[in-house]
Image: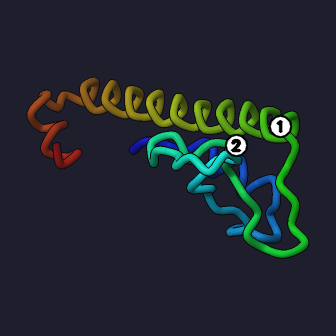
Amino acid sequence: MKIDFVQLALKELRPNNDNWYGWATHDVDGNKIPNDQRMCWEHAISIISGVTKPTKEEFDSKLAEVKARETAKQDALIAAKESALSKLTALGLSADEVKALLGA
């Protein structure tokens, strides 16, 4: 599963208003923004009155924090899986038995 770091960062920057933002469909000149280019800080817009868009600096800092945290989580999961596989193999299970246990 691919992690959407941009949305995680935006949500964490305004934790009391999870769904405070949306995506602009047109730029300031009225040109349509392609869907695959819309979901970034530059095109994030506040859709709740009184909730301001974070600065680029705030966003960049939070994005780096979120990426580091989520990458560490993924690394920990990979390490735990490798450890579990190693332990199961050490117990004498074959590769096919380990796959059967994991549902692979």
Between the C-alphas of marks 2 and 1, the distance is: 7 Å
Residue pictured at 45% horizontal, 48% vertical: 35
Q: Secondary structure at mark 2?
A: helix
Dot 2 amino acid type: Trp
Position in image of residue 30 (x %, y %): 62, 51
Left or right for 92, reference 76 = left
Closer to the camera, 84 or 59? 59
Q: Secondary structure at mark 1?
A: helix
Q: Are marks 2 and 1 in contact (CB under 8 Å)?
A: yes
Identify which residue, 52 or 83, lies in the foreground.
Answer: 52
Task: Check disc 1 and report the residue beneath it.
Answer: 56
Task: Residue 76 in the image: state x and y as whole percent.
Answer: 54, 32
| Residue 25 image-quadrant placement | bottom right
Q: Residue at x 28, y 32 (%)?
A: 88
Residue found at the far bottom of this picture: 49
Tell me if 1 is positioned left or right of 46 in this view. left
Quadrant where the C terminus is found in the figure = top left
Given residues 8 and 97, the one toward you in this image is 8
Type of the residue with mark 1:
Lys
Q: Residue at x 23, y 45 (%)?
A: 102
Q: Which residue is mark 2?
A: 41
